[in-house]
Amino acid sequence: MIDPATFGRCNICGGTEFEAGFLGRLSTNGKKPSCVKCKSAERHRIIYDVYTHLRAFMKERRGLQFAPEGIFRPEWFKAFDFSAYGRHNSYDMMDIPLPEGAFDIVISNHVIEHVADDAKALGECLRVAGETGVVHVTAPSPSYRYTTQDWGFADPEKNEHYRDYGADMGRDLCRRTPGAHAVGVIGHDPATFATDTIFFFSRSEATLREIAQPLQRALFGCVVVA
Ligand SMILES: [Zn+2]
């Protein structure tokens, strides 16, 4: 949400000092992206902001996160578990050993670009989230390219990513994943003003409306993708 009162401030820890990111990275508009105090980057603050407005939705749901990074707090959910490669559960996202509907929300933040078959992974997450569940997917900067480029292997030159997602990400994933619908939520980072898109996928259009309503009331851009 765009709130001038919070401009230049980290909405996670309240910090006001920022530095360049990994390898001197600056934000799209040249601002320093990394919070000195809590080390958050643009995407962390945007996700935190969006979920601030989804607390009522989350507290009735069981969450499962792939590769947690501290932004999603277990206390936001009715129950919470995670899969961390080689450490805890270590699920293969393309073949998750859990029954249909084991959770209500499955979260993957900067994970799916590391998975060989992203549609298969999304299908598995949707199965685990059940008929009325939801799957959060964020990936690096889909709004900054026109189309997804998939080179078919984990490229060590590109952080082991299989692809760069483009603006077609949500629609393309729905086209390749039976029964999937999606909304894209556009958030703004209060510190750098950078934008990012969070995709919520579900087999239930009613669930997506339930997510979009509080976000629209808080003036987030919510776009029906498919
Ligand atoms: Zn911070």
Image: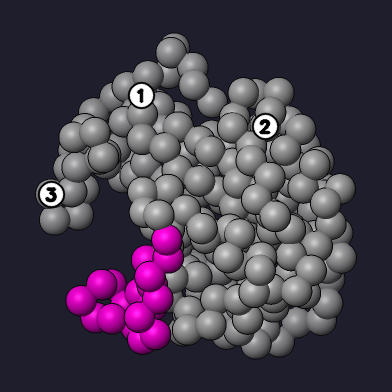
- Spatial CA distance of label 3 from label 1 is 20 Å
Query: Which residue lies under the disc numbered 2?
Result: 215
Q: Position of residue 177 (x, y in %)?
A: 69, 73
Ranked by sequence position, the earlier of labels 2 and 3 is: 3
Please identify, in this view, whether the residue under mark 2 or under mark 3 is nearer the observer: 2
Which quadrant is the C terminus positioned in?
Answer: bottom right
Q: Where is residue 52 shown, x and y percent of the image?
A: 61, 34
The tag earlier along the polypeptide, 3 or 1, is: 1
Q: Residue at 36%, 49% (x, y): give it.
A: 144
Q: Tell me the residue at 74%/58% (across/down).
A: 181
Q: Residues within 10 Å of mark 3 (few under 14, many from 20)?
A: few
Q: Position of residue 25 (x, y in %)?
A: 18, 48
Magenta-colored stretch includes residue 63 = no
Looking at the image, which is closer to me, 9 or 43? 43
Give the residues in magenta: 147-164
Above or below for 106 versus 36: below
